[in-house]
Image: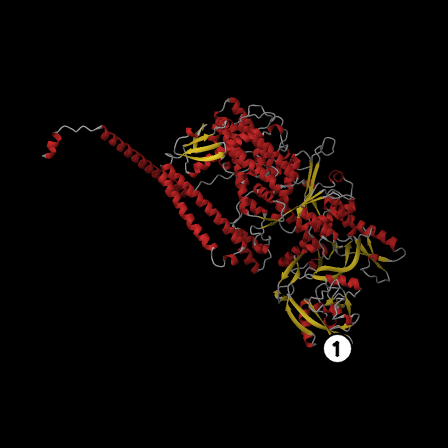
Amino acid sequence: MSEQIASDQPPKVKTEKELEKERKKAEKLAKFNAKKAKQDSLKANQTANSEKKKEKASEKPAAAPVFVDQTKSGEKKILVSLDDPSLKAYSPKNIESSWYDWWVKEGFFEPEFAEDGNYKPAGVFSIPAPPPNITGALHIGHALTIAIQDSLIRYNRMKGKTVLFLPGFDHAGIATQSVVEKNLWAKEKKTRYDLGREAFIEKVFEWKDVYLNRIKGQFLKMGASYDWNRSAFTLDEARSKAVTEAFVRLFEDGTIYRDNRLVNWSVKLNTALSNLEVDNKTVAARTLLSVPGYDEKVEFGVLTSFAYEVVNSDEKLIVATTRPETIFGDTAVAVHPNDPRYKHLHGKFVKHAFLDRQIPIITDELNVDMEFGTGAVKITPGHDMNDYQVGKRHNLEFINILTDDGLLNENCGKYQGLKRFDARKVVIEELKQKGLYIGQEDNEMTLPICSRSGDIVEPYLKPQWWVSQKKMADAAIKAVRDGEITISPKVSENEYFRWLENIQDWCISRQLWWGHRCPVYFVNIEGEDNDRNDGAFWVPGRDLAEAEKNAAEKFAGKKYTLEQDEDVLDTWFSSGLWPFSTLGWPEKTPDMKTFYPMSMLETGWDILFFWVTRMILLGIKLTGQVPFKEVFCHSLVRDAQGRKMSKSLGNVIDPTDVINGIALEDLHKQLLVGNLDPKELVKATEGQKQSYPNGIPECGTDALRFALCAYTTGGRDINLDILRVEGYRKFCNKMYQATKFVLMRLGDDYVPPATGKLTGNESLVEKWILHKLTVTSKIVNESLEKRDFLESTTAIYNFWLYELCDVYIENSKYLINEGTDAQKKSARDTLYTCIDAALKLIHPFMPFITEEMWQRLPRRSSETSPTIVKAAYPVYVEEYFNTEAEAAYELALEITKGARSLLAQYNIVKNGKIFVESSKERVFNIAKDQESSIVSLIKAVNEIEVVSNASQVPDGCALQAVSPDCNVHVLVKGAIDIDAEITKTNGKLGKLETQLQSIEKTINGKDYAEKASSDAKVLNKERHEKCIAEIDGLKATIANLERLKL
């Protein structure tokens, strides 16, 4: 009833004040509903996007079709269209096929001469590649050598020089014979003696053919641009002739002589060893080790003390030794001349403990330390390197107590026939029985281990051929001091001088069958029993006929027969002739005239003494010239943890496995092929799991080469991380996709101008990129000339990635799509100039991808090279250098960076609104002129507005200063859900604060300062600082967001 009455009454007229109140309420409600709708929309979009991502993640990408290369071997690669589905993504296997065979067939790697037959006006550049041993396969250290050398070779070839990169292989005497003997025993249970010398050597040649070809295949895979027509092998006919010539000449002038001196002897292999074949193993205390030929382990790291009785006295002289079995070779006991304890014994004798002879007591201040032990030292000149020198100084008797097989010989009396380490036990036991044993104590010692057999190396007296090196060393030192040869890095030069200044004569005899048999003959004179150690009864000969002639002249009127020395020469002797034997020496060949001395020798610093110095010694001695003008010593490759590459650690890397990729299981299988014992196999397997938990990904040759050069900093070691190599594979993909994009932008009908000269139509960004190109070209040329591989690779990488791809290619889209005809042409021409030069710049490091993509580019009419291999290398172009354009466009880039930073900070991913504010006319004009350019570089923005005053910037913007004269503003209010962003940022902040508390708890913990390692302290300090910085940043973001709500 009341409702009816009320409705019949006329409506109340609202006042202006009430109407205004309702209007404001409606507006507020509308804003609330709009905000809620926006939140619901955002939430719906997030949910939809999340679902899409889940669907996308669950969808397995369809496998790309397999690329089938139809190119016949040796022919130019058939370039399939880049639109082909199999070429959608970068694949090293696809890119790197066919090119190498074509390069070789076309002779691109052969030296190119001028029309008159002389070398080209640009000059000559040559490198003799270090010949790898034919004992198995190349490892990652070889790959580093190839990467560095071939980069320099390809660079100099592109510089227009006559270039020779000379390949070859080393017969590796002891290493190869050892491996073949092991193989022979494992497969046939035969020794070399069962076969005889000739048959065994045939067997080794069979091995050589297999493994030489395997190594050659790895060289091809690495893209090494060798002139294969000049390939050499240290045991081939030409090199053998050079070895014989060198030996005969050096024998005839007295440089090679015969002497009975101490050598490193391997009982297991029955041969002398070079120092390089001896590994030094330190044992800290009493240690049992396995030794070839012994069923039980042998004890080392023990110092045994015993007494010598003084003749005609009750006194005893106590000495100590780590090798009691050598007592049979003792020929003196040495004391210091100033030691008051023993002055009364000077010139007296002690009785030998086991043999009927007396031993003199001598004084020697060089070899005796009064403060160490008892101050008395047993001297065994025939079995100790230091004692050998003492024996020489004091004219002591040199007694050899062993046979070649490591048994005690006739000089040991009734103990003859005992094995050397069995004799050790017998000696100690009998010293106890005689009352001469004093005691034993732990003693740290260094054991010489044969790297080929694991045997304990024995200092052993053996008649051998020796090379007198002092005079040659003086000439080699002078050559470097006078600048005829440069050695880098400097640390290697210092080591070179130190080694040559303390050089010892070189034993070149090896008791092997595989190698260059010594071209020298013993003259067996009828009726005479002459000493084979006496060089007077030996004659050299380039062949038997010459030896007969020499013997007839030397022993006229006597009857004799000639017997060639059974020994072969140290492998390093033939390797020492490498820079000139490979050019045809001793003949005066055209190659000797053109390429000798070689331009440079590049190798690892670890063989500076064993190989490099010997090439210099023999080169100067035999040719009268230095063998090369420059020596560059690269680093040694270690694993990511800094450990030396070792089969027993399971971290040895075959470069082919990095190129092709390999599963962890297959890496494990490779270990089974080697000679690891069961314990080592377990250790190596675990090592592989640690180093390569997911196997090794397919990286390709280009990425591997570039990575190895980028790692070359001049330091002593490279800690190779496979993930970094994989990162460069992604860089290859970036280059591949960038070049594809360029080709698309240029179009099929594009014809580049004859030259890259400026036209005057270049936009600011074009001037900027051309400036960057010429600066990069200058840096790369200069750094390669000074062998700075880090600087050269960094400059190229930065140009490709951060300047060409990230800036100019992105920017050119706008110019080519929306510019005037003149702008379009200029942008295309600049794009072509840059991609052409960029491919050429990186070609020395990445030969395959650069040839593949360069062959797809159109050619300038001035370009005559059929291959990028012979194309001209980019150089500094004066007219491209433009610092004004650089500074102007760098400002545009700084504005871009500032805008991107703000957009990312506030999570604005599209339709962003940017205001660039500057009251400076120059800055304002640059920003205004580059509006389109800036927009093209920021995906989240469609337009920007350039203003001259901050008052022109609307409220609700966030600011970032680009420079003192320029600010960037991003409109935040209305672009994002501020409350949601605050919530999200608070969540991140909470996690970081929890993380900070955990770090501080660790740092402030008890005993942290004393017990934590220095590495852990540094890491925790960095984590603490980073965490605080991130927290401060998030708090600032929250404060800004709160301010924007107002």
**Closer to us: 15 or 669:** 15
Tell me: 906 left or right of 606. Answer: left
At x 63%, y 51%, the residue is 136
Task: Pick the residue in front: 10 or 461.
Answer: 10
Up-down relation of residue 747 to residue 705 (above or below): above
Q: Is residue 138 visible?
A: no
The residue under label 1 is 314
Across and down, in percent, residue 614 comes to 73, 49
Does any portion of residue 616 appear in the rendered image? yes
Circle 1 SS class: loop
Compare residues 653 and 992 and report the one nearer the observer: 992
Residue at the limit of the structure toward the top, as seen here: 821
Which class describes the residues within 10 Å of circle 1: few (<14), some (14-19), or many (20+)?
few
Looking at the rendered image, the quarter that the N terminus falls into is: top left
Q: Tell me, what colour scheme is on the image?
A: secondary structure
Residue 747 x %, y %: 52, 27
Residue depicted at 53% across the width and 39% down the height: 731
Label 1 sits on what residue type? Asp
Relative to 649, say whether 590 is above or below: above
**Which quadrant holds residue 101?**
top right
Q: Looking at the picture, does residue 835 appear above or below residue 708?
A: above
x and y, in percent, of residue 916 in the image: 46, 30
| Count of numbered labels shown in the rendering | 1
Residue 771 appears at what percent x and percent y?
58, 31
Which corner quadrant holds the C terminus? top left
* Left or right: 69 in relation to 457: left
Residue at far left of view: 1
Is the residue 1039 above or below the residue 768 in the image?
below
